[in-house]
Amino acid sequence: MTTQSLAILVLLGTFILLILLRFPIAYAVGISSVLCLLVQGVPVSTVCQQMVKGINSFSLMAVPFFITMGVLMGSGGISKKLIALADACVGWMTGGMSMVNIVASYFFGGISGSAAADTASLGSILIPMMKEQGYDEDFSTAVTITSSCEGLLVPPSHNMVIFAMAAGGVSVGSLFLAGYVPGAMLALSLMIGSYIISKKRHYPKGDKFSIKRLIKQLGTSFWALAAVLIVVFGVVGGLFTATESAAVAVIYSLLVSVFIYKGLTWKGVWKILEQCIDTLAIVLILIATSNAFGYCLTTLHVPDLASKAIIGLTSNKIVIALLIDLIILVLGCIMDMAPIILIATPILLPIAVSIGINPIQFGIMMVLNCGIGLLTPPVGAVLFIGSAVGKLPMEKVVKATIPFYICMIIVLLMITFIPQISLFLPGLFM
């Protein structure tokens, strides 16, 4: 066995073993990288150099800013206002509260960019409301966790910034624009699924539609939705970089939460910043160790070997695209979102490009794939949060989520095989 083959075996074997032993992802990635370099006779200091290099990036600064913006707005009383706006839009339909849940997630996702934050914030309000109105508790929880994935696609999503960094040179502004239509399609697909189930189970309708009420709620929610406009139009229009727009959005969110909605006090702001630091510590150590892991993959030519192996199985582009989706979905069952993006992108992106998939389209595929992974056992973070908020066993939630898994996979396949779903808006405005 050559040194290269042994190093690849140690790198991937150690990583998989540590994951199965339930080591934290950052430890698994870091330890396997160190062992791989030792096998090659490379100084261990290289790991430290690559970790520092991984987080020494101006564009990466957008990630902590977007996370801070989401936490500020989510804690500033915005959740209830967005629920009221969604209720004014779609609450009149059969299964009205499930529709409200899905649309509110689309609005809130544009602010938080986090499926976990969406589930924790909106779920704690909407799941009890749905139970009171006669909805089954497992259905209510399933709707909440699946609709939370809309926030991963709707800008500003910090996961898209991470993908842009991992892909090397992909426009963040284009990724932001590319997420709108797939996010809306995901919402529509979940609404159709909810409507069918609601009809069968005779779930109630809400109040009749009122244009006056809708205008009133739009006026109330305007300040929150404007944060998204600042980010997207700032980046797309060339006024700001992604990092600069995120910094502006944090200041705006702070002012809106404290002075306009008055859902936060200055004392509360400090507590929120402590929460952000906890989250950022996890995200940044993952990015740092994943960069070292990616360095090992690159020097060992693993992306090239993986590309040849997959293309060697078949030359059919449709089958290769399905294999790429399947690989990411399987990874999503055992890993969190950020490390999948950081580790799998350098391997799978060249394969996707070789069969004609645009890097921006692949970014949307990657994000939605990982979003589905957040809902699948055994490591589905959002699934666990939803089970905790809904106070239900995970098995019961998974069973209720099966129809929505189908809806999400249909949207994923459409994004995979219809490029214009992702590329229409970037092509129009960029």
Image: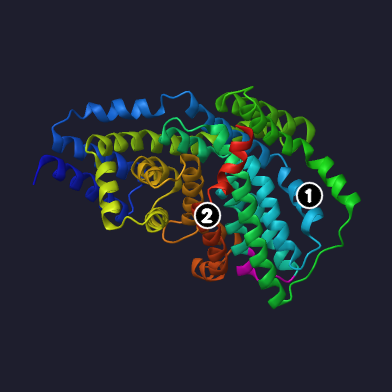
* Residue type marked 2: Val
Q: Earlier in the sequence, mark 1 or mark 2?
A: 1
Q: Which mark is residue 382?
A: 2
Is residue 203 shown to the viewer in this render? yes
Give the mark count: 2
Asked if the magenta segment contains residue 137, the reply would be yes
Q: Residue 414 location in percent, x, y? A: 54, 56
Q: In the rendered image, which quarter contains the C terminus?
A: top right
Q: Residue 386 location in percent, x, y? A: 56, 58
Q: Choose mark 1 or mark 2, whichever is in front.
A: 1
Q: Which residue is mark 1?
A: 85
- Hey, which quadrant is residue 343 in on the image? top left
- Does 213 appear above or below 175? below
* Residue type marked 1: Leu
- Does 397 appear above or below 89? below
Tag 2's secondary structure?
A: helix
Q: Residue 149 location in percent, x, y? A: 57, 52
Tell me the residue at 71%/36% (across/down).
264
Q: From the viewer's perspective, is 377 left or right of 294? A: right
Is residue 156 shown to the viewer in this render? no
* Start-end of magenta stretch: 134-140
Residue farthest along the right direction in this orientation: 212
- How was the colour assigned to the protein in this rendering? rainbow
Tell me the residue at 13%/32% (across/down).
41
Mark 1 and mark 2: span between their CA atoms? 24 Å
The residue carrying pointer 1 sits among few (fewer than 14), some (14 to 19) or many (20 or more) residues within 10 Å by Cα, namely many
Q: Residue 381 location in percent, x, y? A: 48, 53
Q: From the viewer's perspective, is 206 left or right of 416? A: right
Q: From the viewer's perspective, is 203 left or right of 60? A: right
Asked if the magenta segment contains residue 174, the reply would be no
